[in-house]
Image: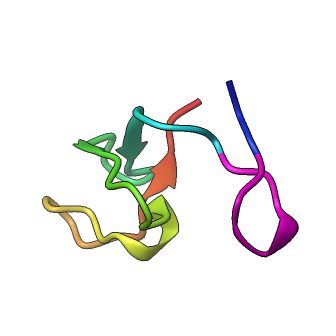
Amino acid sequence: MPGRGRMGGFGMGLGGNCICPKCGATAVHQRGMPCTQQKCPKCGSIMTREM
């Protein structure tokens, strides 16, 4: 269940994956680090949170 994130925003909750919108690679979401701050391990693009 999504909850309150940092700075009053809404977080996606624990667990889940980050996904690359360019090549489709996935990585495990790291707690405390938004997916948008992670680079894809395959192509280097910015990752997004998998819904």
User: In the displayed structure, does residue 32 sit left or right of residue 26?
Assistant: right
**Residue 15 colored magenta?**
no
The quadrant in which the C terminus is found is top right
Of residues 9 and 28, the one nearer the viewer is: 9
Percent across and percent down for residue 24 are 33, 40
Percent across and percent down for residue 3 are 74, 41
Task: Determine the residue positioned at 50% across, 36% down.
Answer: 50
- The residue segment tinted magenta is 4-11
**Residue 8 colored magenta?**
yes
- Where 12 sits versus 9, above or below? above
User: In the displayed structure, does residue 32 sit left or right of residue 39?
Assistant: right
Of residues 28 and 26, the one nearer the viewer is: 28
Task: Determine the residue positioned at 70% across, 69% down.
Answer: 6
For the stretch drawn in magenta, the main secondary structure is loop
**Name of the residue lying farthest toward the right:** 8
Task: Determine the residue positioned at 85% across, 67% down.
Answer: 8
- Where 33 sits versus 21, above or below? below
The quadrant in which the N terminus is found is top right
Of residues 42 and 8, the one nearer the viewer is: 8
Q: Quadrant of residue 40?
A: bottom left
